[in-house]
Amino acid sequence: MAKRGFCFYCGFVAQHYLRELPGTLLTMPTLRAFPFEVKRGIRVVDAMPPTGVRPTSTVGAALDLVAASDPVRFGRVGMHIRTVAVFAGLVSSVYHPAFKICCVNLRCLGSPGDTPSPIEFLASIIVHDATIGYLEGQGVLRTGTNYDRFDRLCCEEARRFLKRLGMARTPWDPERLWRPSLRVALTFGLQDMKQGSGRES
């Protein structure tokens, strides 16, 4: 692995502090405004409108699954994720290495009866995001030149985790990976926001 020298830290600060500063200024106070529970030593924040469903329980079950089935990968989760925040978003998850925050969109998890189940898929997403933190902790920044290889390594860790649970095929298999277009992602995001405003009214 690469050494975390001066160039690494300059790139890390530029990428995760300066470039993400507007989002950070919005996200950090927001996280403190919403209720949270501590699951497996990780702060789980419920930033969704009340629905009768407890997202914190879903995240807690996913963390329990990782801890019970794969202690090594759970060790990485505990080291590189301090907070899991349940948000309405444009994609399934966003990871902020500087603050060790994993933001997840439970809308993307599928339905009960799916393979993998929503809990299993969420657990694999958490493993994926913890791998981002692990790689950067080893001195490897995700850049334009290594983006595809970096992403493949993270997806491969999530795939191996689900394989460990006995699945022959996973959503992380190369032929099944799908990145939504900006139009599709914005459509899902707007639907989430409309549903949220409707619940609040």
Image (cartoon, rainbow, N blue to C red):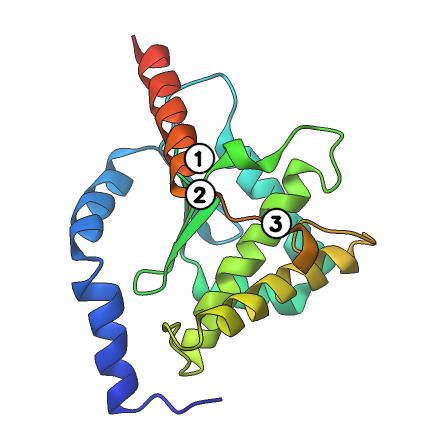
Res. 123 mark: 3
Residue ID for mark 2? 181
Viewer-side residue, 33 vs 107:
107
**Which element is circle 3 on?**
helix
- Classify residue 116 by image quadrant: top right
Q: From mark 2 to mark 3, how far is it between C-alphas?
A: 25 Å
**Which element is circle 2 on?**
loop
Label 3 crowd bin: few (<14), some (14–19), many (20+), radius 10 Å: many
Viewer-side residue, 92 vs 76:
92
Residue ID for mark 1? 184
From the viewer's perspective, is the residue at label 1 or at label 3 nearer?
1
Hey, what amino acid is under mark 2?
Answer: Ser
Which of the two discs, 1 and 3, labels the residue nearer the N terminus?
3
**Which element is circle 1 on?**
helix
Hey, what amino acid is under mark 3?
Answer: Ala
Label 1–label 3 contact, CB within 8 A: no
- Classify residue 181 by image quadrant: top left
Q: Is residue 149 above or below residue 169?
A: below
- Classify residue 35 by image quadrant: top left
Identify the residue shown where x is 20% and y is 71%: 14
Label 2–label 1 contact, CB within 8 A: yes
Q: Quadrant of the C terminus?
A: top left
Label 2 crowd bin: few (<14), some (14–19), many (20+), radius 10 Å: few
Residue 17 visible to the viewer = yes
Identify the residue shown where x is 36% and y is 34%: 186
Hey, what amino acid is under mark 1?
Answer: Val
Q: From mark 1 to mark 3, how far is it between C-alphas?
A: 24 Å
In the rendered image, residue 16, in percent from the top left (x then y), is placed at 26, 65
Which of the two discs, 2 and 3, labels the residue nearer the N terminus?
3
Q: Is residue 8 above or below residue 191?
A: below
Identify the residue shown where x is 57% and y is 70%: 153
